[in-house]
Amino acid sequence: MQDTPTPLILFLASGLAVLSCPADLVFMVGNDDASPPFQAELEQESGAPIDDDYYYENGDYTGLTVTSGNWTGGQEMLRNGTNTDAIGMPRAVTTGATTFHIHFQLSAAEVAMNSLVYRTELVSAKNLTTSEITFRMNNQPLYVESATGPTGATQVPVAILFSPATGSAVAGSNFITITRTGGSDGGTGSAWLQFDFHELQAIPEPSTTGLLLLGLFLLSARPLRARVAA
Ligand SMILES: [Ca+2]
Ligand SMILES: [Ca+2]
Ligand SMILES: [Ca+2]
């Protein structure tokens, strides 16, 4: 009598097939760390002047956001230890510094792919507080993570699978925007939520098979917030 593969095994086999297809890493900002302090490689947010723009690579980003321009410095340093200059990747959004942008380039081939997958892990909230986080690409809404506040060693993985059209992707300059759009300071007077890393991949598979890729994250790691944007 022939064994019938369990749904889980079929699922894994399909997922591995997805992984074997070529995927382009568009950007990886920071390290995916397994333990605190997850955000140590990133710059303290805020400072003066507040710099909301992180440049992953060279390009003319003029006009895409309020403060963006023509960037020629290569990948911007993640952290130079000075949070009062324009260099560094903000480690958090807060009640005072609510927004930042990651500026990056897409090739024509990446724009022509079926799906984009953005991933992060939310970490190290201020005690007693929650934050609602809204993710956008090129000003197009992708996903809202409802009020969350992981503390200590807890991580909240977020993966957003969407089509390039949903993000208004173009060959050339693009940007992802992350904003604290709500939440509670728990009576403490301020709130913050931090990020372990930010990653964007372009994958050739449509969203249906891309879901299997997300499924692998689900099986291999921690509870996942997954969203498919049509
Ligand atoms: Ca900057
Ligand atoms: Ca800096
Ligand atoms: Ca990290």
Image (cartoon, rainbow, N blue to C red):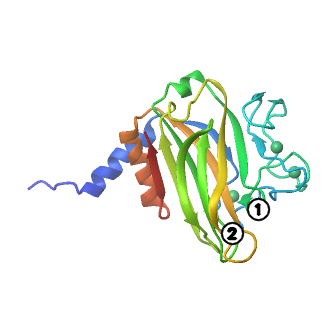
- Amino acid residing under circle 1: Ala
Q: Secondary structure at mark 1?
A: loop
Along the line of sight, the residue nearer the viewer: 219 or 64: 64
Q: Secondary structure at mark 2?
A: loop
Give the number of marks: 2
Residue in the picture at 74% in, 57% down:
91
Cβ(mark 2) to ligand 3 < 8 Å? no
Along the line of sight, the residue nearer the viewer: 114 or 50: 50
Q: Is residue 151 above or below residue 83?
A: below
Residue in the picture at 77% in, 50% down:
89
Residue in the picture at 62% in, 60% down:
182
Which image quadrant is residue 125 in? bottom right
Q: Is residue 188 above or below residue 202?
A: below
Cβ(mark 1) to ligand 3 < 8 Å? yes
Alpha-carbon neighbours of circle 1 within 10 Å: few (<14), some, or many (≥20)?
Answer: some
Contact? badges 2 and 1 (CB < 8 Å) = no
Mark carried by residue 22: none
Along the line of sight, the residue nearer the viewer: 69 or 54: 69
Q: Badge 2 is on which residue?
A: 36
Q: Badge 1 is on which residue?
A: 40
Measured as percent of width and height from the top left, residue 69 is found at 81, 31
Along the line of sight, the residue nearer the viewer: 15 or 130: 130
Does any portion of residue 121 appear in the rendered image? Answer: yes
Q: Quadrant of the N terminus?
A: bottom left
Measured as percent of width and height from the top left, residue 141 is found at 55, 43
Measured as percent of width and height from the top left, residue 177 is found at 66, 44
Q: Is residue 100 left or right of residue 118?
A: right
Q: CA distance from mark 2 to mark 1?
A: 8 Å
Q: Is residue 189 left or right of residue 151?
A: right
Does any portion of residue 34 appear in the rendered image? Answer: no
Residue in the picture at 73% in, 38% down:
56
